[in-house]
Image (cartoon, grey):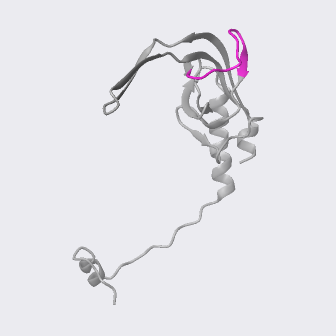
């Protein structure tokens, strides 16, 4: 026997009427959306954003943003790199998501290493009560700062979808 709650009983008494989904022309709507996105990406005044995956972290970035990476990396100041792991890219009226990543050949996110430095030292205090021991360690992590040069989506991105 189907147990119903007091909220569903009035609906069941009236009889649930369902409407079947209407199928629209997929090719026409897809080409319309694609053309709008291509117009927006072609206009250089529109600012695109990207969600990138770097050092086990995700960053939502646009052009001229700074990213702080907290790990030792073999990069030197002035090196230009391409961020290949792009999860999503979009503008003011669209977003294209990857499953899980967008193809690196159809996106172009570049960055430059601006600075390599160490963070301000933080105190790491360990106290073991029953052994009457305490330790004070000062830890400072190495930090790499990147400046995003460009975020671009190529037309092949939409034609592969």
Residue 137, x across and y down, in percent: 44, 18
Q: Is residue 65 visible?
A: no
Residue 52, located in which quarter of the rendered image?
top right
Residue at 52% in and 68% down? 21
- Please determine whether, in this image, residue 72 is positioned above or below residue 8: above
Residue at 54% in and 12% down? 118
Q: Is 61 or 16 nearer to us in this picture?
A: 61
Q: Is residue 82 visible?
A: yes
Residue 40, located in which quarter of the rendered image?
top right
Residue 11 painted magenta: no
Outermost residue to the bottom: 1
- Please determine whether, in this image, residue 136 is positioned above or below residue 12: above
Residue at 59% in and 27% down? 48
Q: Is 24 or 125 nearer to us in this picture?
A: 125
Residue 43, x across and y down, in percent: 64, 24
Residue at 31% in and 33% down? 130
Q: Which residues are magenta?
A: 69-81
Direction from residue 135 to residue 74 in the image, left or right: right
Direction from residue 156 to residue 131 in the image, left or right: left
Residue 78, x across and y down, in percent: 70, 9
- Please determine whether, in this image, residue 143 is positioned above or below residue 22: above
């Amino acid at each position: 026997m189907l147990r119903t709650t007091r909220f569903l009983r009035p609906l069941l008494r009236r009889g649930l009427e369902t409407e079947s989904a209407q199928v629209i022309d997929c090719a026409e709507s897809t080409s319309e959306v694609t053309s709008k996105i291509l117009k927006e990406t072609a206009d250089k005044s529109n600012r695109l954003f990207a969600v990138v995956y770097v050092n086990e972290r995700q960053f939502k970035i646009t052009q001229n943003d700074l990213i702080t990476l907290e790990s030792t990396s073999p990069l030197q100041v002035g090196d230009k790199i391409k961020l290949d792991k792009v999860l999503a890219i979009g503008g003011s009226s669209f977003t294209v998501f990857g499953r899980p990543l967008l193809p690196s050949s159809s996106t172009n996110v570049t960055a430059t290493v601006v600075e390599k430095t160490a963070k301000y030292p933080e105190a790491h205090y360990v106290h073991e009560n029953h052994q009457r021991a305490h330790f004070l360690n000062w830890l400072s992590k190495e930090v790499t700062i990147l400046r995003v040069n460009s975020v671009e989506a190529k037309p092949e991105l939409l034609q592969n979808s």
